[in-house]
Image (cartoon, helix red, strand yellow):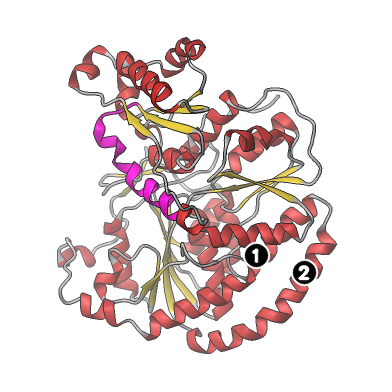
């Protein structure tokens, strides 16, 4: 019997999002299944899963996005819309478009009386103004609390509109794991857009799932590498279309650039349509690029071809890494990022002989355990902070550990005067074998030229008392009784 996945990542076995401590004890306790569920008695903000649902789909062509919420919830669209516009520019689009977004604008009267009338009005406006092929309806905390039956409303409206209506249940309070927003989007796509019966396979077609944070240069590089395996790529959902979504079930196999973006959806495609998938790692760094490329290659029977390519790339790239190693050997690093990029960056720094002292990631689960066991074989007992944001913990740890470099969003750590950088880059390829060389030189340049951060530090105050830096960073994480 096929499983039924709720879309809430906390429902998966052995998933933790409130955790902190040394990597070795955490790994050992996880292996023994001794880790206790915990919660934070104080929390400094979380990333809402609605943000991820919207950002995953906001670049889809022929679509309108109806956000059934108060106006404030639409604020998260700003970042996603900016990424969409920048991505168009990188793809050579001359007439750059913004995503088409309509807010139902729930107010206090709607919270009491229900928001059905406003949702119907928003959908009607979307159909009349844009005549799209798809209208995605995103729920919110407010619509979830008042109990608007969005699916029933959409079913009632559907006969009167030409667009496919796709309700997405991404109420922000449902999950602390923001990746649940990706799952909510894909569950809706499967339910409302995909054919329910298996489709004829298109020979050589591979689904490649990628989030919006993947740059166009990285997309091109990954598509090039897959082209070496003599396959065609169905790149979704970023800059995708209704037709490409319909082709998902005709593919011979699936893979993802980010390990957490479409992992649950690929399992559903395997169980429902018999489409096998390669679920490995993000292809950043030598080890991860090898593992990712070989994973999909062996799945489609092209393992020998992939191994030959990997051997040639090692012969080309590894000697060039020696010069970068001389610049970075022994430098101590703290890493913060999404689950995919944080562990990818942690594996990457081993290529340069750097030492991992701290790792912040939103979730700890079976996949994370595999990565941590690998990293524990390379690095000493570094600190792990499992946190969806929580900058107060991050600054406490960074201040105590005093790394030579911080990899991640630099908003907080840059104020300590520490060199900061990121493995994200919207303009250059960071993935594949050339990406390793680019990132190595980028990291080395930042460590050797930290002038901006050092000049910033005396004038940029952090909103924490000195006493906080002397306390245990994890003191607010309490076991659930």
Crowding at mark 1 (Cα within 10 Å: few <14, some 14-19, many 20+): many
Say if 245 sits above or below 342 in the image.
above
Which residue occupies 35% across, 73% down? Answer: 401
Query: Circle 2 sits on which residue?
Result: 309
Is residue 381 part of the magenta span, yes or no? no
1 or 2: tag closer to the N-terminus: 1
The residues tagged by marks 1 and 2 sit, at their Cα atoms, a distance apart of 12 Å
Say if 410 sits above or below 144 in the image.
below
Give percent across and percent down for residue 42: 25, 47
Query: Circle 1 sits on which residue?
Result: 289
| Magenta highlight range | 68-86
Near-viewer residue (11 or 90): 90
Instruction: Identify the element where label 2 is drawn.
Output: helix
Q: Main secondary structure of the magenta part?
A: helix
Could you tell me if residue 31 is visible in this image?
no
Could you tell me if residue 137 is visible in this image?
yes
């Amino acid at each position: 019997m096929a499983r039924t996945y709720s879309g809430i990542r906390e429902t998966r076995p052995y998933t933790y999002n409130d955790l902190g401590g040394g990597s070795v004890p955490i790994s050992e306790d996880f292996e023994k299944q001794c880790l206790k569920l915990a919660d934070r008695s104080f929390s400094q903000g979380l990333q809402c899963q609605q943000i991820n649902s919207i950002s995953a789909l906001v670049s889809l062509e022929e679509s309108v996005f109806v956000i059934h919420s108060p106006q404030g919830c639409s604020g998260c669209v700003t970042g996603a819309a900016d990424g969409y516009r920048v991505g168009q520019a990188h793809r050579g689009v001359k007439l750059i478009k913004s995503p088409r977004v309509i807010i139902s604008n729930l107010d206090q009267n709607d919270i009491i009386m229900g928001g059905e009338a406003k949702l119907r009005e928003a959908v009607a406006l979307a159909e009349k103004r844009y005549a799209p092929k798809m209208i995605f309806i995103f729920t919110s905390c407010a619509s979830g609390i008042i109990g608007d039956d969005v699916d029933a409303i959409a079913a009632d409206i559907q006969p009167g509109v030409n667009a496919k209506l796709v309700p997405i249940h991404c109420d922000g309070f449902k999950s602390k794991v923001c990746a649940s927003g990706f799952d909510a989007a894909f569950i809706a796509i499967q339910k409302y857009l995909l054919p329910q019966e298996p489709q004829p396979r298109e020979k050589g077609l591979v689904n490649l799932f990628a989030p919006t944070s993947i740059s166009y240069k990285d997309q091109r590089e990954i598509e090039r590498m897959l082209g070496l395996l003599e396959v065609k790529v169905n790149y979704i959902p970023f800059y995708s279309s209704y037709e490409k979504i319909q082709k998902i079930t005709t593919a011979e196999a699936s893979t993802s650039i980010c390990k957490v973006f479409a992992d649950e959806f690929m399992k559903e495609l395997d169980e429902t349509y018999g489409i096998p998938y390669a679920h490995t790692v993000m292809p950043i760094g030598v080890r991860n690029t090898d593992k990712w490329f070989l994973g999909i290659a062996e799945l489609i029977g092209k393992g020998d071809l992939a191994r030959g390519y990997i051997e040639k790339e090692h012969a080309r790239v590894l000697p060039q890494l020696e010069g970068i190693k001389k610049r970075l050997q022994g430098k101590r690093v703290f890493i913060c990022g999404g689950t995919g990029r944080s562990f990818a960056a942690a594996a990457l720094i081993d290529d340069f002989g750097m030492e991992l002292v701290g790792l912040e990631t939103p979730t700890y689960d079976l996949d994370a355990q595999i990565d941590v066991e690998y990293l524990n074989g390379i690095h000493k007992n570094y600190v792990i902070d499992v946190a969806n944001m929580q900058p107060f913990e991050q600054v406490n740890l960074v201040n105590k550990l005093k790394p030579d470099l911080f990899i991640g969003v630099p908003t907080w750590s840059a104020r300590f005067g520490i060199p900061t950088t990121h493995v994200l880059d919207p303009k250059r390829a960071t993935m594949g074998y050339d990406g390793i060389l680019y990132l190595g030189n980028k990291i080395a340049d930042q460590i050797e030229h930290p002038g901006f951060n050092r000049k910033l530090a005396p004038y940029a105050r952090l909103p924490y008392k000195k006493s906080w830096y002397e306390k245990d960073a994890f003191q607010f994480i309490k076991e659930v009784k």
